[in-house]
Amino acid sequence: MALILTVLEIVAPVFLLATVGFTWVKLGFEYRIQFVTQLAMTLSVPCLIFVSLMQAEMDPSALTALTLASFAAYLGVTLVVWLCCKIGRLNTRTYMAPLIFGNTGNLGLPLALFAFGEAGLSNAIVVFAVMAILSFTFGIWLVSGEGALGKVVREPLVGATLLGALFLWQGWETPLFLTNTLSLIGQIAIPIMLITLGVAVARLSPRGLGKAAFLSLIKLIICTAVAWIVADYFALGHIAFGVLVIQIATPVAVTSYLLAEKYGADSDAVAGLVVTSTLMAVGALPLILAVLL
């Protein structure tokens, strides 16, 4: 019973905030998702990443191990998803990126924070940064047929990650007034991302939900299994192990839908994946957390 209550305390705030966004839209209130997303991705999330890394108490070797494990996990997931797409004769432009990359930002970061505290958030940011780099390069190439290395270089969250890692490695800290300012801006990120997730789900027009539900289950199994094997292989510590599994196992991100729409893939099919995998996560992620805690 104590474990169930602990898990509920972790996941309830996450899904309740997403429900706030969902309800807000259904009640007909305005929500400028493009502005809010831009605010989060160019300002609040980079501030959150930088301050969390700068103040993290992570050994450089542990940071390196988690980074390598993150790349290895995404490589493993990519290979298995590619094989499944070939066997199932699925359109790779439409399905590969959504089945590989999860919602490590909107959902993964707050889950890691609530489950493992500030140490969990620092670890989750490392996985999130790896996902962002791969998503903006390999992920865009999968959907559009062309890479976007220049976009990665220009992304504030990538710069914030590199700068935060440098400060962590050197043991530097910004002046207290600046740290407090950046921390305050960063605190916007998690609630605003969760509310935006609910808004985005409410506005999607999915189709083929039966197929989407089956593929969402396949994604959950593949991602959880691969991340678990990789975390065990790299002998990650308890927190890093749990964070890697949770981050890789997160449901399909709304950005996958936006990319599909932008580059002419089947965006309605991807919308179905976003909705069904997010709903599936409501039940699945608490179970995974119960095993990890």
Image (tube, rainbow, N blue to C red):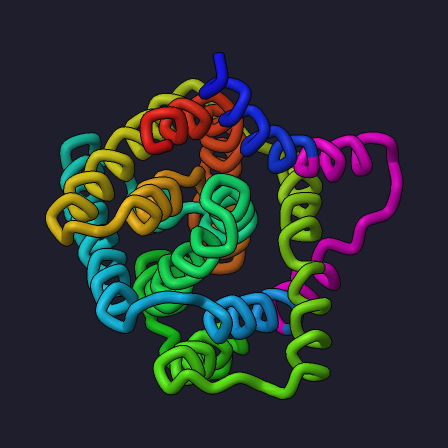
At 50% from the left and 26% from the top, the residue drawn is 7
Residue 123, percent from left and from top: 39, 57
The answer to whether residue 182 is above or below residue 41 is below
Which residue is at the front of the view, 33 or 249? Answer: 249
- Residue 292: quarter of image: top left
Based on the displayed image, in which of its 4 quarters is residue 251 positioned? top left
**Residue 162, image x, y percentages:** 41, 80
Instruction: Tell me the magenta residue range.
Output: 17-42
Foreground of the two, 1 or 288: 1
Question: From where the camera sits, is residue 257 visible?
Answer: no
Q: Give residue 102's position: percent from left, percent from top.
A: 41, 46
| Image location (x, y in percent) of residue 106 | 56, 49
Looking at the image, how many numbered discs can be counted on the residues?
0
Name the residue nearer the viewer: 165 or 215: 165
Q: Residue furthest left?
A: 233
Residue beneath the point at 55% across and 47% down: 110
Main SS of residues in magenta: helix
Q: Is residue 134 placed above or below 197 in the rendered structure?
A: below
Up-down relation of residue 257 to residue 133 (above or below): above
Q: Nearer the viewer, residue 285 or 79?
A: 285
Asked if the magenta segment contains residue 37, the reply would be yes
Query: Which residue is painted at 29% across and 44% down in the image?
Result: 238
Q: Quadrant of residue 181?
A: bottom right
- The C terminus - image quarter: top left
